Amino acid sequence: MTRQVRTSPGAASQFKGFTSHHLRAGFGHLRSRLPTLWSRSCFVATAGAVSAKTVRRHIVGTRYERAPKAGGRA
């Protein structure tokens, strides 16, 4: 049986706010060096009926790169 998890769009914002607060409390230099700790964007996806082992293997094997900024510089 497939289990469906529902989250509100605000769940990611709440998580970011909570972690930002605690990270800045524990690492004071973050407060002065970074105007914001997290971006406003959020990505959520489902994996369907795939095992956690398969998802983990995909994540580990994926190479993440930043998209080039306008003007051609990365």
Image: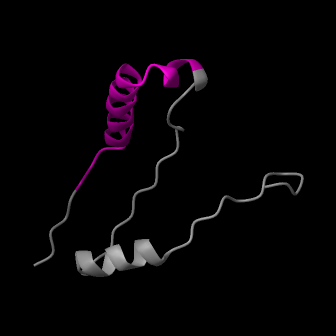
Q: Is residue 8 magenta?
A: yes
Q: Specify the principal SS of the magenta part.
A: helix
**Percent position of residue 46, x then y:** 34, 68
Give me the residue at 33% from left, 75% from top.
55
Question: Where does the N terminus fall, quadrant-wise?
Answer: bottom left
Vertical arrangement, residue 10 with respect to residue 35, above or below: below
From the viewer's side, name the closer residue of 45 and 73. 73
Q: How is the image coloured?
A: one colour
Give me the residue at 30% from left, 44% from top.
8
Vertical arrangement, residue 35 with respect to residue 64, above or below: above
Please state if 8 lies on the left or on the right of 16 as rendered.
left
**Percent position of residue 47, x then y:** 32, 73
Please state if 65 lies on the left or on the right of 16 as rendered.
right
Magenta residue span: 6-32
**Percent position of residue 73, x then y:** 85, 54
**Percent position of residue 7, x then y:** 27, 49
Which quadrant holds residue 16?
A: top left
Give me the residue at 31% from left, 81% from top.
54
From the viewer's side, name the closer residue of 49 and 67. 67
Vertical arrangement, residue 43 with respect to residue 41, above or below: below
Marker count (numbered):
0
Question: Where does the C terminus fall, quadrant-wise?
Answer: bottom right
Which quadrant holds residue 34?
A: top right
Which quadrant holds residue 15?
A: top left
Vertical arrangement, residue 50 with respect to residue 43, above or below: below
Q: Residue furthest left?
A: 1
Q: Is residue 46 magenta?
A: no
Give me the residue at 57% from left, 66% from top.
64
